[in-house]
Image (tube, rainbow, N blue to C red):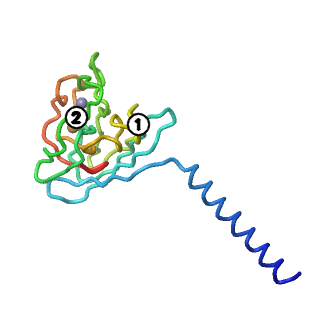
Amino acid sequence: MTVDRVIQIALVIIVVVILAIVAFAALQPKGTAVQLTDTSGDLIGSALLSEGSSGGTMINVEAQSLTPGEHGIHIHETGRCDLPDFETAGSHFNPYGTEHGLENPNGPHAGDMPNLPVGNNGDVVNYQTEISTPLSGGEESLMGHTGGTAIVIHADRDDQMSNPSGNSGARIACGVISPG
Ligand SMILES: [Cu+2]
Ligand SMILES: [Zn+2]
């Protein structure tokens, strides 16, 4: 084999490897990891957001150092989590002008989710849910919304009915999904 031929074969192999890597990357579900911090500014966990199979968003939350029991958890309409109370995250993300709560006949908001269960050790128990809101795209998506979006965990249980926030109390943890 000539040197030229060896170089040709090597180039073909390199191109095939690059194409394989690109194809593999394209097949991976697109997603983003969101850091969750508490009202002291300490990192307590993360939320993994990825594109769901039917155009919505899969949300996996793992976190520690929370009080045992159920906690309201929602997408809020501004991508800011300023201390000490996360009020800068704004109201619930509501691009469709609906009411609060998964059990509200006029609901839910686009980012309402089932309560977050926390065990006696303060760890979140296996939480995965899917919302119909898309992760990326236009104004009604989590990443495309002007002003960004954030995920907020509350002190109390969400009753999934009362406006504006299901009586879920103070905001105890927050993570910016897309910056405002
Ligand atoms: Cu909330
Ligand atoms: Zn809501």
Q: Name the amino acid, label 1.
A: Pro
- The secondary structure type at the circle numbered 2 is loop
Q: Is residue 162 above or below residue 55?
A: above
Indicate the position of residue 103 as horizontal and vertical percent values: 29, 21
- Cβ atoms at labels 1 and 2 below 8 Å apart: no
- The secondary structure type at the circle numbered 1 is loop
The residue lying at 21 percent from left, 34 percent from top is 157
Density class for disc 2 (Cα within 10 Å; few <14, some 14-19, many ≥20) is many
Q: Earlier in the sequence, mark 1 or mark 2?
A: 2
The residue lying at 10 percent from left, 52 percent from top is 84
Q: Mark 2 and ligand 2: say if the CB distance to the nearest ligand atom is below 8 Å.
A: yes
Q: Is residue 3 above or below residue 43?
A: below
Q: Quadrant of residue 133?
A: top left
Q: Residue furthest bottom?
A: 3
Indicate the position of residue 152 as horizontal and vertical percent values: 23, 43
Q: Name the amino acid, label 2.
A: His
Label at residue 101: none
Residue that badge 2 annotates: 92
Q: Quadrant of residue 130?
A: top left
Residue that badge 1 annotates: 134
**Residue 33 or 169: which is nearer the viewer?**
33
Q: Quadrant of residue 94?
A: top left
